[in-house]
């Protein structure tokens, strides 16, 4: 089995640490857990690197990322013991519940706005229809010439508006 270069190992360790930070913040992928399997998948490395290896003579040696697996387990244990995050999946579920509640409230507000705007639209259309009918009635009445009375014109002089 080929050994990886120091550059590749460093790059993988950085990816593992970044994935570790995400998982410990509760940013779990769909179906993921706060475990080594998810950590490996998120970092893009094989899970076997987190476990000890056997030499040909039967002795064991640490896996290339075993120290990171131990660090992850220790940080996870510390978080759970502090009570800050008893279970990251529970924290994710709670975060998603809050998000769902906020989205439901937004939808309810938008529904209220839509209902109010529909009522306003209906009122405006009714008023426009009534005004249109009144204009038609007045035009028909003016065209018939029956009830239209011409008012005499008066002249006003000066700013006081007295008649002459």
Image (tube, rainbow, N blue to C red):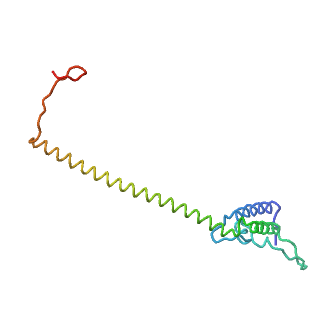
* Image-based side of 113 in relation to 95, left or right: left
**Of the pair 3 and 9, the residue shown nearer to us:** 9
* Image-based side of 104 in relation to 121, left or right: right
Q: Residue at x 14, y 45 (%)?
A: 140
Mark count: 0
* Image-based side of 146 in relation to 43, left or right: left
- The x, y position of residue 66, in whole percent, is 82, 69
Q: Please tell me whether residue 118 is drawn above or below residue 29 in the rendered image.
A: above
* Furthest-top residue in this view: 158
- Based on the displayed image, in which of its 4 quarters is residue 161 positioned? top left
- The x, y position of residue 108, in whole percent, is 47, 61
* Furthest-bottom residue in this view: 58
- The x, y position of residue 157, in whole percent, is 20, 20
- Based on the displayed image, in which of its 4 quarters is residue 25 positioned? bottom right
* Image-based side of 132 in relation to 57, left or right: left
The quarter of the image holding the C terminus is: top left
- The x, y position of residue 79, in whole percent, is 75, 66
The quarter of the image holding the N terminus is: bottom right
């Amino acid at each position: 089995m080929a050994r990886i270069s120091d550059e590749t190992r460093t790059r993988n360790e950085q990816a593992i640490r970044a994935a570790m930070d995400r998982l410990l913040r509760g940013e779990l992928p769909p179906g993921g857990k706060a475990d080594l399997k998810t950590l490996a998948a998120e970092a893009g490395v094989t899970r076997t690197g987190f476990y000890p290896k056997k030499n040909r003579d039967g002795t064991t040696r640490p896996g290339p990322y075993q120290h990171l697996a131990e660090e992850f387990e220790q940080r996870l244990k510390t978080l759970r013991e502090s009570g800050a995050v008893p279970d990251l999946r529970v924290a994710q579920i709670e975060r998603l519940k809050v998000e769902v509640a906020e989205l439901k409230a937004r939808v309810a507000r938008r529904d209220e706005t839509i209902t109010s705007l529909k009522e306003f639209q209906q009122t405006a259309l009714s008023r426009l229809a009534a005004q249109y009918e009144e204009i038609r009635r007045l035009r028909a009445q003016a065209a018939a010439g029956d009830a239209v009375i011409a008012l005499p014109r008066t002249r006003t002089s000066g700013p006081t508006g007295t008649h002459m």
